[in-house]
Image (tube, rainbow, N blue to C red):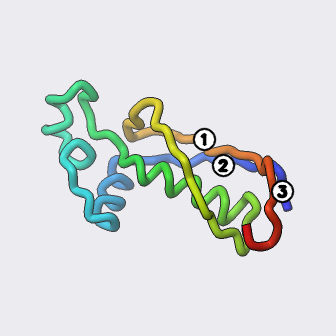
């Protein structure tokens, strides 16, 4: 098992629209450039759940990878993500609870 891993992902406005289609969350703050332009963000903000999905990718594909099942996530969104953007996702195994956790 790897103890550290990272990857980068290019996130485009089209990715945010695709995520809205999958999740059903069409909040105009995420999907409508005209609406978002009138907010403090000035452009559509990436769904927080999109970012959470990248953590799932980190766990399921890299740390620890195969057969990983996330049991818990505690997230804090420190600032908005505004596509297009390159995100670096990185993590480390700090505790291994065995084969089932």
Judge by depth and name the residue closer to the eye, 82 or 56. Answer: 56
Do residues under tags 1 and 3 come within 8 Å of each other at their CB atoms?
no
Q: Nearer the viewer, mark 2 or mark 3?
A: 3
Question: Between disc 2 and disc 3, whose residue precedes?
Answer: 3
Alpha-carbon neighbours of circle 3 within 10 Å: few (<14), some, or many (≥20)? few
State the residue at coordinates (60%, 41%). 88
Name the residue tied to disc 2.
Answer: 7
Q: Which residue is mark 1?
A: 88
The local secondary structure at tag 1 comes to strand
Lower sequence index among marks 2 and 1: 2
Contact, mark 2 vs mark 1 (Cβ under 8 Å): yes
Q: Is residue 1 above or below residue 29?
A: below
Residue drawn 56% across and 53% down? Answer: 73
The residue beneath circle 3 is 2
SS for callout 3: loop
Residue at position x 79%, y 47% from top? 94
Q: Is residue 40 above or below residue 81?
A: above
Q: Nearer the viewer, residue 54 or 37?
A: 54
Quadrant assignment for the C terminus: bottom right
């Amino acid at each position: 098992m790897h103890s550290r891993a990272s990857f980068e992902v290019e996130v485009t406005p089209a990715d945010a629209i695709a995520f809205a289609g999958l999740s059903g969350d069409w909040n105009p703050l995420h999907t409508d450039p005209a609406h978002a332009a009138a907010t403090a963000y000035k452009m559509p903000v990436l769904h927080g759940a999109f970012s959470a999905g990248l953590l799932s990718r980190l766990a399921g594909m890299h740390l620890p990878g195969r057969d990983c099942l996330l049991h818990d996530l505690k997230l804090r969104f420190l600032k908005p993500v505004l596509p297009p953007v390159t995100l670096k996702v990185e993590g480390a195994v700090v505790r291994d609870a065995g084969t089932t956790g």
